[in-house]
Amino acid sequence: NITSSTNFTTYDVQSIDITSTSGEVCATFIFVTNTVAVGCELHIQNSTITLSRKFNRSLTLNIAEGCISNISSGYYDLYVYDVENNNTLSQSPAIIKNEVFVDEQTTTTS
């Protein structure tokens, strides 16, 4: 298991806590106070694949959280984009995390 945290304040997403286990990347995104962003979008990519998912911000908690599953083992770069109040992505990523390792997904059959 790998857990990491990064703090930034230039964009609406202020920080991200990432946990990577067993074919899955989970994240909690913390937004700056009084932001107009409605959420964020996480892009996970390496040289062969790009996955993305939008996460809606909780207005009462000022966070967004969730997971992207079914990811093959390997190193990935993570890019977090603000989702503005008109549902457009910020032009540049708010946060970039390089070489996050995802463990091999375990599969059970019966």
Image (cartoon, rainbow, N blue to C red):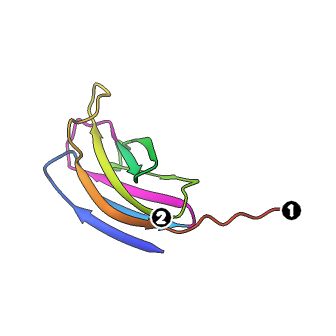
Nearest the viewer among 35 and 25 is 25
Q: Which residue is mark 2?
A: 74
Mark 2–mark 1 distance (CA, rounded to whole Å): 27 Å
**SS for dot 1:** loop
In this rendering, the label closer to the viewer, 2 or 1: 2
Res. 110 mark:
1
Quick check: marks 2 and 1 in contact, CB under 8 Å? no
Q: Is residue 14 visible?
A: no
Residue 51 in the image: x percent, y percent?
Answer: 46, 45
Look at 86% across and 62% down and name the residue there: 110
Residue sitting farthest toward the front = 47
> In terms of image quadrants, where is residue 6?
bottom left
In the figure, 24 relative to 45: above or below? below
Q: Is residue 7 visible?
A: yes
Crowding at dot 1, Cα within 10 Å, few <14 / some 14-19 / many 20+, comes out as: few
Look at 31% across and 48% down and name the residue there: 80
Query: Three-letter amino acid code at disc 2?
Result: Gly
Mark 2 or mark 1: whose residue is earlier in sequence: 2
Look at 26% across and 37% down and name the residue there: 37
Residue 73 in the image: x percent, y percent?
Answer: 53, 64
In the figure, 36 relative to 45: above or below? above
Residue 42 in the image: x percent, y percent?
Answer: 38, 47
Look at 46% across and 58% down and name the residue there: 26
Magenta span: 22-40
Answer with left or right where residue 91 lies relative to residue 97: left
Query: Three-letter amino acid code at disc 1?
Result: Ser
Residue sitting farthest toward the bottom = 1
Answer with left or right where residue 89 lies relative to residue 25: left
